[in-house]
Amino acid sequence: MLGLIVNCFAENREIGILTSELREGWTIASVWGGLEVKIDNGILRTAVNESTKQWPGFGLKVWDKKFTIIIKDKNAYLSFLINGGNNIYGQHQGGHYLIIYLGPSQIVDGIRKFLNKSCPLESYIDAKVIDDDPFTWQKVNIPISDFAEHEEIDFIQFQYQNQPVDVQIRDIKIVLDKSEVDTK
């Protein structure tokens, strides 16, 4: 297959998906439930309003398969920083729950199907929820193996489990331990 090969022996051993901007080939692919999503200065920010429904979400997607990330490292993990945001009244709030999907996906009869299982954010964050402090960023590390066995990463989805509040996410990356990583 044609495509880029990521140097798995790089000193920092990270594959950035969202650092100062989205990785080449990646885009905000879907937003639903009345949620607004934008990336500004390397920070992905959601915005809720009066018309935002329960269980909204958004996804980051690779459309061109040559930018799909292939992880052969069984000890790799998805890492990002997260902070709460404002509710519809403009007050900073934490306490929200998110479900995260990572991996390959397919469209079947117009519906996106994930080939890996989801991971609830509360299993991977201190205090089990996003805190109320607007000045802190909480680190989240989710082992790739917790999502399933598929090596391909072409989609990351964040979905609220309840009524949403704004959220901020930055430094989304895959962190490698050992082994081979490449992109198609």
Image: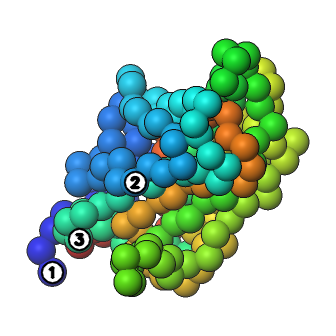
Towards the viewer: 49 or 168: 49
Which three-letter amino acid code belongs to the residue tagged 2?
Answer: Ser
Mark 1 vs mark 3: in front: 3
* Rendered position, 12 above or below 112: above
Towards the viewer: 112 or 136: 112
Quarter-of-image position of residue 118 = bottom right
Give percent across and percent down for residue 76: 55, 65
Tell me what residue is drawn at x 60 percent, y 54 percent: 159
Which three-letter amino acid code belongs to the residue tagged 1?
Answer: Met
* Rendered position, 80 above or below 110: above
Give percent across and percent down for residue 73: 49, 73
* Rendered position, 82 above or below 147: above
Which three-letter amino acid code belongs to the residue tagged 3?
Answer: Lys
| Disc 1, SS | loop
Towards the viewer: 74 or 160: 160
| Disc 2, SS | strand
- The disc placed on residue 46 is none
* Rendered position, 65 above or below 12: below
Compute the Cα span from label 1 to label 2: 27 Å
Q: Which residue is mark 1?
A: 1
Q: Which residue is mark 2?
A: 30
Quarter-of-image position of residue 117 = bottom right
Tell me what residue is drawn at x 57 percent, y 36 percent: 51
* Relative to 42, 136 lies left or right: right
Which badge, 3 or 2, is on the more N-terminal residue? 2
Tell me what residue is drawn at x 72 percent, y 54 percent: 161
Which badge, 1 or 2, is on the more N-terminal residue? 1
Give percent across and percent down for residue 169: 55, 37
Label 2: few (<14), some (14–19) or many (≥20) C-alpha neighbours in 10 Å: few
